[in-house]
Amino acid sequence: MKTNPPLLASLFLATSLLAQPAERPFIFESDVKIAMRDGVQLTANIWRPKAEGRYPVVLMRSPYGKMDEQWDDGKHYTAAGYVVVVQDCRGRGKSEGAWDPFRYDVEDGFDTQEWVGKQPWCNGDIGTAGGSYVGWTQWASAANASQHLKAMVPVVPFDNAYDIAYSGGAFQLALLMGWGAAVGGVAVSPDKLPDTFRHLPLNTFGDQFEKKVPYLNDWVAHPTYDDYWRKRSIEHRHADVTVPILNIGGWYDIFSKATLDMAAKVRASSRDRLARRNQFVIMGPWAHGVGGRKVGELDFGDVARLSVASWQFKWFEYWLKGRETGVQNWPAYYLFVMGENRWRGENEWPLERTVFTSYYLHSGGKANSLKGDGSLDTTAPKEEKPDEFTYDGDDPVPTVGGNNLVGASAGPYDQTKVEERQDVLVYSTAPLEQDVEVTGPVKMILYAASSARDTDFTAKLVDVHPDGKAYNLCDGIIRARYRSGMEKPALLEPGRAERFEIDLWVTSNLFKRGHRIRLEVSSSNFPRFDRNPNSGRPFGTDTEMLAAKQKVFHDTERPSHLILPVIPR
């Protein structure tokens, strides 16, 4: 789990440029100190053309370390007439201050842009680049940005740390604790991760290591969107984003939903007409590493390959140098439709022609596992027996593939082993008589009851191939106490049926003729999400797991159903 700057450099400017200019002499300055508003000095490495003049700047702010003088992309961009600045985030590398993820990037990003824009080698125009946390550092200062910021290319980005920490009210354990420990200087071997994630109580997770990582406990101490998280987000100020942005993400990335939502919010609300028009998104069949053809157990073909660096270079040439590179002819959304395995341009998200279609759950009361009698179709249920299962936090449903980074594999994986469990309800359509395209946000309305005062319910959308292999597409979770919203926590009345809305995030997939659409329902997805102890006690304080008896209803009054964004073809 040690961070590796050379590997992570691929998340900055991605792969090398398709059309590389010949190398030219450049000036390299290392560990240049830049003062922030509170006096803390952050360090940066700077590559700039040796020729006199003022140039546009490509800026990256990273917690993963700076590249050295021989970094290819630094040399390529200087040869193309740019200055490149790579800065250590506060408390990282040789920068001063305390490392507290997400906390200072809003202010530090603005201050750094102001400093860069006033340098004698800068023409006043800045473009930002980079992926993952380096995508966050771009978005962190996007609202009310420096006057010098003219374009952004965030790869696998996000704009609100709270939305990443808590999904449906459940804590994204593997991502936050796994990544958080690593960047906190704690190396946990992969074979010890499963036991590490089982640590209880969760509010002392950061105390179990020889080196204390206090922010790990802080994240658990703030399960709702409060002042702590407001300082670690752009505060939903999408109307104040006035910069052209090219977002690049993947359907199996940990930030897939955020990548699309951010662009859509700016398009809908920015006070700047130019910014509203110039929010672009590329979504490929990728996990956190973008641009390849294979992810998980599926190969999407050579067509899935995409040179992120080429798109990025054209973006900067247009916005920072005014050169015609075809940017204005790009579709607002360039989406890869899995299953069909082809790219398609779209003008909005969700697509205007979407037919949101309800697929209802059915069974004779025995939908448990692949061997059960669960089915799925577009006909509303009448009177049917509910399905029941027991959720045991000491034996949670394992995470197999999906939107992961740490602690579990990412991408599409055969779910057959998961679907053999009795605590997983399985509902499948008959083999499809014609292709069905699902592109957009996926949601489930679940009517369920529990013996517990608090519990979780999960849902997973799966594409079942004719050979029986079942590949996950997207999934989601809801913590019962937050069924009416994160601002209105309320414990359950044991045994009483309630309505739950589960956000399964986003996907684009063609369910081919002969395939089946499948839904899995359960109460855990570990270690992607923390295990609900079912006690109803304050989050993070439990020291043991209690079992919960769950009921899922599908009848006239409680018609549980999956809502799919079907695209007419």
Image: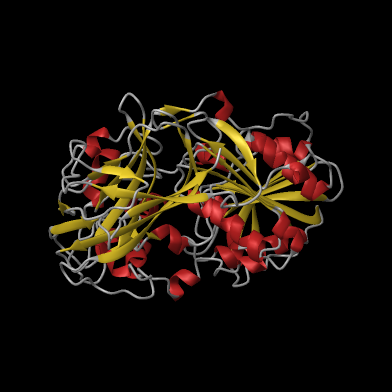
Query: In the displayed structure, would residue 301 be above or below residue 427?
Result: above
Judged left or right of residue 148, residue 391 is left
User: For residue 218, what is the image quadrant?
Assistant: bottom left
Judged left or right of residue 34, residue 430 is left
Asked if residue 386 shows in the view, the reply is yes
Judged left or right of residue 137, residue 464 is left
User: Residue placed at 18% from the left, 54% from the top?
Assistant: 386
On-image quarter of the N terminus:
top left
User: For residue 81, what is the image quadrant?
Assistant: top right
| Spot occupied by residue 13 in the image (x, y as percentages of width and height) | 63, 41
User: Residue placed at 26% from the left, 47% from the top?
Assistant: 362
User: Residue placed at 33% from the left, 59% from the top?
Assistant: 171
**Colour setup of the view:** secondary structure
| Spot occupied by residue 520 in the image (x, y as percentages of width and height) | 29, 45
Front-most of 519 and 365?
A: 365
| Spot occupied by residue 235 in the image (x, y as percentages of width and height) | 54, 70
Front-most of 420 and 14?
A: 420
| Spot occupied by residue 9 in the image (x, y as percentages of width and height) | 56, 40
